[in-house]
Image (spheres, grey):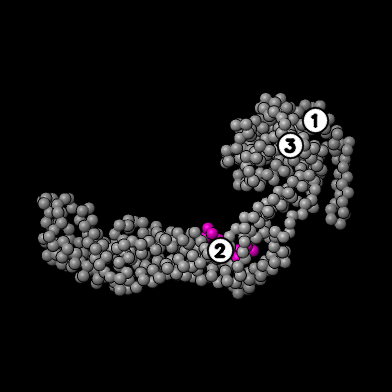
Amino acid sequence: MDNQKIYNDIVISFFNIIKNEKLRTKIALNSEYKDKVVTLVCDLLALEKDHNCTFKNSEWSSVYAKSVVNITKEKIIFKKSEGKTTNDIYADYADILTVSMNLYDVKREILTDNLIDITAEEIKLNSKVTITLKEMYAEKDAENPQIEVVDQSKEIPNMNNNTSGTENAFNQSQFTNINNPIPIPPIQNPRFYPYKTKPNPKHIKQIKFIFGIVFAFLGILYIIFQIWLSTQTILVNRQEYPGLFDSWNWLTSNSNQDLQNWNTISFNVMLAYTPSMNPNLNWLFIIVVGFSITFVAYSYIRQPRHYREQFIFPWRITWFSIFVTVIIGFRFVYPQLWRSLSNSEAIHENISMLFRRLIENNFSGGSFPNNFDASIEVIFSNIFLETVNLSTVNTILWLEFSLCIATTALIILIIVINPRLDRQKLARANQEWQKNISEAMQGRKYNMDESLFESESEINKFNDSKKNKNKDDKDNKE
C-alpha cells in the first residue's frame, strides 16, 4: 500500500470533514469522533516523519492540528503515531469515513471529493463552530432517534432515546457493523499460507532437530576450546634456561639494561594460534558465539508456535546461523591456522612472530640477535610442547573443521528446500483484502476468496496438537 497515496487521501478527506458544517460540529460535540480525528492528525505526522510524505510539497499535520484545537477549544497534545503499519493507518482512515457516512449521513463522494483547492487559509476559515451550529446539530440528532432492528438472538437493539449525545449510536457504528468487521491483513492471518510449496512437516522437524544439535555441538566445542586456550599461559624463565638470551645484544646501553632486567616473560597460548588477533577480543567472541548458539539452536528445536512455522525455516534464523558459522570457521580460513591442522610449522612461526612483537614493544631499537631463531626453537620444543599437547589441539581443530563443513552443508540444504514466497498468491490476497475494506466502507459485506486460505479444520488440528504437547510437557514436569 502506497504511503503517499494514503497521505493524499487523508489530507483530502480531512479538508472535506472540516469544511462540512455537520462533521465539523460533531468534532466539538462528540468526544469519540474527536478522538478519531486526533488520531488521524497523529497518523499524518507519522507519515510525514517516517515516510517523508507531503501534499503539494507541504506538510499538513500542523495545519489540521491547529484546526482541531480551534474547533474544540481544547488543549490537545498531538504525538506521532508509533508502531503503526501502513495498513493500520489506512484502517484509521477507513474508520472515520465509515463513521461519517453511516452515523452522520454524509455521502462518500463528499468526503473523498478531490476537485477542490486545499489551502491553509481555507482550513483556518472553516475551523470555527458557533453556538448556533452546536444547538442545531444537537437538536437534529435529538429529533430523530434511530431504532435498529436486529436479530434478538444475536444482538441487543439500540433503544436509547437519550438525546444529550450520540454515544450509543456511535458505538453501534464502530467501523461498519459488529457482524461485518474489517479483517486483518492476509499476511497476519494464521490461515493464510503465502508460500509456493508445503513440505512434509515431519521432515522439516527432523532437519531442524539435526541442524540444531549439530550447530549446538559445534558452538559448544568452539567455546570450550577457546576458554581452554585462554587459560593456558606459557612462562619463559631466564634463570631456568641460563644462556638462552645471553647473546641477544642491542646497540644501546639502555636496551642492554632492559635486557638484564628481563627475567621472566609470559604469553597466552591463544596468541600462538591467533597472533594477529587482539587477545582482549577473545572473551567478546566467546560471549557473542555463546548467545548466538543458544538463540539459533532453541529457535530450530522448539515446537512451532504458528501453523506456518511447521513448514518453513525462518530466514532470519538461517542468516544468523550463517553468521555464527563464519565466525567459528574463520580460524580455518586464516592460512597459518589452516596449516596447523596438519603440522606444527605454523605454530612455530606464530611463536617466533609473537616474540618479535614482544621484543619490539618492550625494548628500544636495535637489531634481533644472531641466535634468535635458535632461542625460539628452544622455547617451542622445551617449553611450549611440554605445556600444550599439540596432537590434542589438532584433533579438536579437525573436529571443529568437520562440524563446520557439516553445518554448512545443512545450511545449504535448508536454503534449497525452504519454501519460496508465492508473490502472485500474496498479491491476490491483498487485492481481496482491499475489496473487503472498500465494500465495508460502503456498508456492505464482502466474502473474501476462501481458496486463498487454509481450512479451519487444518488450523484447529495444529492448535489441538500443540495444546496436547504442552499439556504432556506440563504433566511430565509435575
- Which of discs 2 and 1 lies nearer the camera? The answer is 2
Residue 88 x/y as whole percent? 66, 46
Q: Magenta residues: mostly which secondary structure?
A: helix
Q: CA distance from mark 2 to mark 1?
A: 62 Å
Q: Which residues are magenta?
A: 307-317
Residue 239 x/y as whole percent? 15, 65
Mark 2 and mark 3 lie on one chain; the one further toward the N terminus is: 3
Residue 67 x/y as whole percent? 68, 30
Can you identify the residue that label 3 sits on? 112
Can you identify the residue that label 1 sits on? 134
Q: CA distance from mark 2 to mark 3?
A: 45 Å
Q: Nearer the viewer, residue 121 or 151?
A: 121
Helix, strand or loop at label 3? It is: loop
Mark 1 and mark 3 lie on one chain; the one further toward the N terminus is: 3
Q: Looking at the image, which residue is at 58% across and 60% down?
A: 420
Residue 219, quarter of picture? bottom left
User: In the rendered structure, which amino acid carries the disc numbered 2?
Assistant: Asn
Can you identify the residue that label 2 sits on? 418
Q: Looking at the image, which residue is at 88% across and 45% down?
A: 147
Is residue 344 left or right of 283 when viewed as pictured?
A: left
